[in-house]
Image: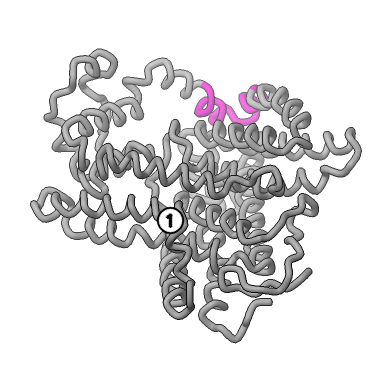
Amino acid sequence: MLRNSDPLRLLGCWLAVILPLTLTHFRAFAEIDFDILAVLFLVYSSRTEEAFSWVRKPWFLTGALWWIWQIICTIKPVLQGEHGGGGALIQSVIAIRFLVAAAALGEWILPDALWRRRMLWVTFGCTVYIAAQIGFQAVFGVNFFGQPRFSDGTLTGPYAHPRAAAPLSRLILPLLMVLCACWDRKKMPQRVLLQGGALLAAAMIMVLAGQRMPFALAMFGLCICALMHKPMRLTAFIGALGVPFLVMLTRLVSPGSFHHLITLTRCQLEHFAASPYGQIYTRVMVMALHHPLMGYGYDGYRHHCNQASSFVEPTWLSKIAATHPTFPVCVQHPHNLYAQALMNSGVPGLVIFSCLIVSILRVVWPGRAGTALQVGLFSAIFIQYWPFTSSSDFLNLPLGGWGFMLLGVALSYKHVPFTQSFPPLQDEPISEGEYGGSHVRRT
């Protein structure tokens, strides 16, 4: 069992438990939470023999290589006065804290079954809370705090702006897998009814939210879960047949969501090159062609986008993209993780970053013996880093923070000697011993 006499570790455990709460509503505290977790883990590792073994893990080594290369790419433009001041260099230096915090969760805190369960329950509570806020706003026109829908008709959930659907699309997958696993042993009609109802309820919430990409990613994630978890394949197939009807129903109960989800999506796909995303990606391509080796340093797109307006586009790119954008393309980041890596550290940085994502997916792969919860975690991490999507900054909170938190939870299961599929939150009975510095008692 956890040694409560170690105040350093006990503080880290409580920071892990409240992390989902801070990511839900207290972004500044979430930053502090990650920072303290990283520092505590480094202090703990320095005091313990072989505690720095986590540094040698392939996924962390790849992440450290990406971090170092990004710093190197940031130094030159900062010294030449071409970047956003020393702040960009400082941000690039401390970027490693998120990977260290994820390692702290997966290697130090959450291998303990008790604290892993506590954090999961808080996480699932936050998931239900966000979904309930969206549902409440769909019915009554305002959320729990009296805030109305967004100006374009989409639902905002517990926030003033429509940013609830993105984290919900990730968090809802492990929760659904836990629920489905609870019903796996029921007879076929009852199991299909319960699992199908849960899947359709989740799909309805995502449809009502009215956010195109989170809805598509959530459905994609459910497909991955169904492929990897055999007991829910039939239910998922039946549920997929009902999704088009849910979308059409939204046209009646939430026209704003339908317009944002279907009408606007169709328009942007038909004229993608002239759409906001098409214009941003065109600028990214032009900038990358001028600095392919080292990119522009940390936050390079934000600091150098205006300068790139004078760059000459290649002929082949001019033919497919509008030359004169009708809106400002110089936003905070290029709205794609891989485009961001290309801007920050050039083609080598993009390759290293891609290897980092592959290493992460490889280490959290649940395998045949994985539980339903592990499948849900893998699916959530997979769609978090899916390349063909618009996304926020890799290190930006709260969405980036949810990704690192889920990574830490998934990593913690690699310290469990063997798994069982039911019940999903019943952690595995393992003998008393240390895994990542934690003592786990036999259940």
Q: What stretch is highlighted in magenta?
A: 248-262
Residue 35 picture quarter: bottom left
Q: Hey, what amino acid is under mark 1?
A: Phe
Query: In the rendering, at what x and y percent does residue 59 appear?
Result: 45, 52
Q: Residue extending furthest bottom?
A: 5
In depth, the one of 306 and 319 nearer the eye is 319
Task: Give the residue drawn at x 51%, y 62%.
Answer: 22
Decide if residue 204 is in sight here. Answer: no
* Quadrant where the image shows the N terminus: bottom right
In depth, the one of 304 and 133 nearer the eye is 304
Question: As drawn, is 131 to the left or to the right of 308?
Answer: right
Query: In the rendering, at what x and y percent does residue 150 appear?
Result: 48, 40
Seen in the picture, residue 406 relative to 301 is either above or below; the reply is below
Question: As drawn, is 250 to the left or to the right of 199?
Answer: left
In depth, the one of 256 and 415 nearer the eye is 415
Query: In the rendering, at what x and y percent does residue 118 appear?
Result: 66, 65
Task: Give the residue drawn at x 60%, y 68%.
Answer: 435
Query: In the rendering, at what x and y percent does residue 98 appear?
Result: 42, 59
In depth, the one of 319 and 371 nearer the eye is 371
Task: Give the residue drawn at x 56%, y 69%.
Answer: 436
Q: Residue extending furthest left?
A: 80
* Quadrant where the image shows the C terminus: bottom right
Task: Give the residue drawn at x 47%, y 76%.
Answer: 44
Question: As drawn, is 208 to the left or to the right of 391?
Answer: right
Residue 233 picture quarter: top right
Decide if residue 161 is in sight here. Answer: yes
Residue 304 picture quarter: top left
Which residue is under mark 1?
A: 60
**Magenta segment, prevailing SS (helix, strand or loop):** helix
Q: Is residue 346 magenta?
A: no
Q: Does the magenta stretch include residue 252?
A: yes
